[in-house]
Amino acid sequence: MTTIKLHNTKSRKKTEFVPIDAENVRMYVCGPTVYDRAHLGNARPVVVFDVLYRLLREVYGADHVTYVRNFTDVDDKINARAAQTGRSIGEITDETIQWFLDDMGALGALEPNAMPRATQFIPQMVAMISDLISKGHAYAAEGHVLFAVDSWREGYGKLSGRSVDDMIAGARVEVAPYKKNPMDFVLWKPSNDSQPGWDSPWGRGRPGWHIECSAMSYELLGETFDIHGGGNDLMFPHHENEIAQSCCAHGDDSFAKYWLHNEMLQVEGKKMSKSLGNFFTVHDLLDQGVPGEVIRFVFLQTHYRKPMDWTEKKAKEAEATLRKWRALTAGIEPADSAAAAVLDALADDLNTAGALAEMHKLAAASDAPRLLASARLLGLLSDNLGDWAEVPEVDLSTYETQLLKAREQAMASKDFAEVDRLKTAFVAAGLEVRMSKAGVELVPGAGFDPVKLEGLE
């Protein structure tokens, strides 16, 4: 069996992955807060942990892996969006969840085995909060319930590598008179009449953010499971607080055995931000004609623990590579398994860049069956992602001859207006114009539309 090695954030080193139960490998990944379209940065952990999910299924068998990714559908951002638009919270979250699933599906992401919504697990959250209070790890104050960080100082901060005292000194935390310690965090908070709320022993209210993942992972994966993942922006405070809640509720330091965090995303070398004008959603890119498979390929070119830079140049190069690979594997049945070198690269802490390098070697050797099997392990070259690469069959020789004649006339008259007009029209139709001493060639691109050539003959 293939040996998988993963970099465990908690131990700060790469170690062999040994599942708690090889018959039931379990992974939990923090999902989105559903109030708007997913931006490109939101998509990176989806693709990263989709690759890990595929690898685990390959090694342990699809029936022996359980992947859970939640939806946060109770949150103040959602409440604010409902107030702004006049729409109901349920309508907004239902719509946004479907947007997310559609956009991630366009990137080739498999749907997890379970996708729980926070609002479906409120009773379990209330029960866990009550248990934490009874064990002295939480306290009620002015309609709130807060986790008492001082009750678990020995464990708090191990994931992020911070001490409680250092965190207090440099923290930007909510200052509230009912907190015993500035680092204490909210498990439950009161709701007014305009906010969603549920009955509880502490009055009508709603859960804090951190408690939902602890309750849902416990209900769906058990007290202890194998892998917990997410972006490194979640390491503190979200994941740190999850560990505290879960370990204190269950009386040990087990919870998740391996912690994986992906780095953040940049655009053209800069942090993605609305103020810089480089902020866009996955849907924006798809609408602009960037294929989801191309987006996925660009993501895979960078190791998940390194910052990823999205550039237009990378997208064009990814599209060119995928076109070559799709042409090479057209009509070919995949091999029974991915190339060993590709699988070994993925098993080495998800070295997707290394896996792609091995696939370039397969393409150079024209090993189409093995290339196709390897690509599909990475979520590439699947049938349901290939529509973008299908070029309409159109005889372009007439247009090539037309441009060639126009160039010959222009060389004699020194008037290149007609050549420029034709080139502009061909590019607008989605053709790449290649002109050399040997002649003229028109090559269809991703957005080739033959209708735009009508009337040019």
Image (cartoon, rainbow, N blue to C red):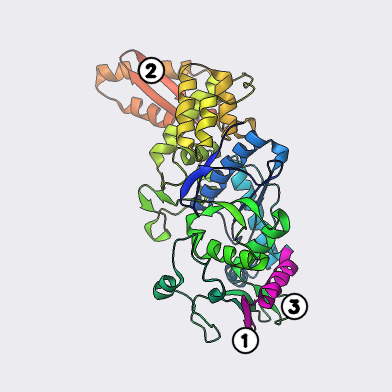
Pointer 1 and pointer 2: residues touching (CB < 8 Å)? no
Which numbered disc flags the more N-terminal residue, 1 or 3? 1
Question: In which quadrant of the rendered view does residue 139 lie?
Answer: bottom right
Tell me the residue that label 2 is attached to.
Answer: 440
For the residues carrying marks 1 and 3, which lies nearer the camera in this image? 1
Say the numbered circle drawn on residue 82: none
**Picture layout, residue 148 above or below residue 321:** below
In the rendering, at what x and y percent does residue 240 appear?
53, 63
For the residues carrying marks 2 and 3, which lies nearer the camera in this image? 3
In the rendering, at what x and y percent does residue 419 appear?
34, 25
Kindly report the distance in space between the C-alpha atoms of the residues bearing marks 2 and 3.
74 Å
Tell me the residue that label 3 is attached to.
Answer: 199
Question: In which quadrant of the rendered view does residue 59 lie?
Answer: top right
Within 10 angstroms of label 2, few (less than 14), some, or many (20 or more) residues? some
Kindly report the distance in space between the C-alpha atoms of the residues bearing marks 1 and 3.
15 Å
Q: Nearer the viewer, residue 240 or 271?
A: 240
Name the residue type under label 3.
Asp
- Which residue is painted at 51% across and 65% down in the image? 237
**Picture layout, residue 66 above or below residue 184:** above
Pointer 1 and pointer 3: residues touching (CB < 8 Å)? no
Kindly report the distance in space between the C-alpha atoms of the residues bearing marks 1 and 2.
78 Å
SS for callout 1: loop
In the rendering, at what x and y percent does residue 219 appear?
73, 59
Within 10 angstroms of label 3, few (less than 14), some, or many (20 or more) residues? some
For the residues carrying marks 1 and 2, which lies nearer the camera in this image? 1
Name the residue type under label 2.
Val
Which numbered disc flags the more N-terminal residue, 1 or 2? 1
Q: Which residues are magenta?
A: 121-144
Tell me the residue that label 1 is attached to.
Answer: 142
SS for callout 3: loop
In the rendering, at what x and y percent does residue 357 appear?
44, 29
Name the residue type under label 1.
Glu
